[in-house]
Image (tube, grey):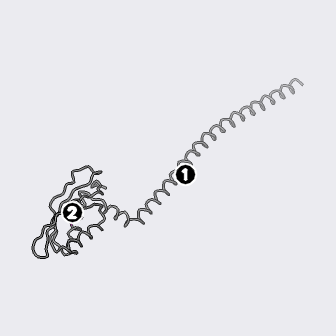
């Protein structure tokens, strides 16, 4: 019986050892699973945020692609050093349309971008055509207005007009 009691005690101690080992192992694996779950949850959150940013970027890119013409019109409305030559060409085309001669005299773009640029030009032609030019000038995309207009008779029906023009919409060249 002693031997049988010792066997029972040994079996109970063995079971307790196995149970303690199982509890320790389960606790160890539970901590690992918990840690890996939090890493996985953090990764899922980051992936979700990246997917959201990707969708937002795709939407923004699509909006830019759909509005290229509007964006170009808006850019054209702002005068910069790099767009000054096309601006002069536009003024020359207006002169051809109106039937007057156009000569750029001076331009001052040294003012800060939040201040208007000054531009001086001379027109030569019939008074009616000069008026037509000024009306066409009022419809160009760049916001500005004539601040000084000097009219001098040339001969018969022709006049020479000297004008100062302020341009308000300006932007840096690199935009």
Distance from disc 1 to disc 2, alpha carbons, whole Å, reads: 48 Å
Residue drawn at point x = 49 percent, y = 53 percent? 53
Residue 79 lies within the magenta run: no
Residue 141 quadrant: bottom left
Q: Is residue 111 left or right of residue 35?
A: left
- Quadrant for residue 118, please give it: bottom left
- Disc 2 designates what residue? 85
Q: How many neighbours does mark 1 have within 10 angstroms: few (below 14), some (14-19), or many (20 or more)?
A: few
Question: Is 42 drawn above or below residue 107 in the view shown?
Answer: above
Q: For this view, does 141 lie left or right of residue 158?
A: right
Tell me which secondary structure the magenta stretch mostly adopts: helix
Q: Which residue is mark 1?
A: 48
Q: Of the residues tagged 1 and 2, which is closer to the observer?
A: 2
- 153 or 97, nearer to the observer: 153
The residues colored magenta run 84-88
Task: Identify which residue, 68 or 93, lies in the foreground.
Answer: 93
In the displayed orientation, state which residue is furthest to the left.
155
Q: Secondary structure at mark 1?
A: helix
The residue positioned farthest toward the top in the image shown: 2
Question: In the image, is residue 23 above or below residue 80?
Answer: above
Residue 71 percent across, percent down from the top left: 37, 63
Q: State which tag comes first along the sequence, 1 or 2.
A: 1
- Residue for point 68% across, 35% down: 27
Q: What crowding class fits label 2: few (fewer than 14 Cα within 10 Å), some (14-19), or many (20 or more)?
A: few
Dot 2 lies on which element? Answer: helix
The reply to whether callout 1 and callout 2 are in contact (CB within 8 Å) is: no
Considering the image in quadrants, where does the C terminus appear? bottom left
Location of the N terminus (image quadrant):
top right
Residue 162, disc: none
The picture places residue 64, in percent across and down from the top left corner, at 41, 62
Q: Position of residue 108 (x, y in %)?
A: 19, 54
């Amino acid at each position: 019986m002693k031997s049988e009691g010792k066997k029972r005690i040994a079996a109970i101690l063995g079971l307790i050892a196995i149970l303690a080992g199982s509890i320790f192992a389960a606790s160890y694996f539970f901590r690992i699973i918990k840690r890996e779950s939090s890493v996985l949850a953090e990764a899922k959150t980051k992936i979700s945020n990246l997917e959201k940013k990707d969708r937002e970027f795709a939407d923004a890119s699509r909006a830019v692609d759909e509005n290229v013409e509007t964006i170009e019109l808006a850019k054209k409305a702002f005068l910069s050093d790099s767009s000054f030559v096309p601006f002069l060409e536009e003024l020359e085309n207006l002169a051809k349309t109106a039937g007057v001669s156009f000569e750029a005299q001076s331009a001052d773009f040294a003012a800060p971008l939040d201040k208007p640029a000054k531009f001086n030009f001379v027109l030569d032609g019939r008074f009616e055509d000069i008026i037509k030019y000024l009306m066409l000038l009022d419809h160009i995309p760049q916001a500005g207005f004539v601040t000084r207009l000097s009219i001098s008779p040339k001969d018969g029906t022709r006049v020479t007009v000297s004008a100062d023009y302020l341009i308000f919409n300006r932007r840096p060249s690199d935009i």
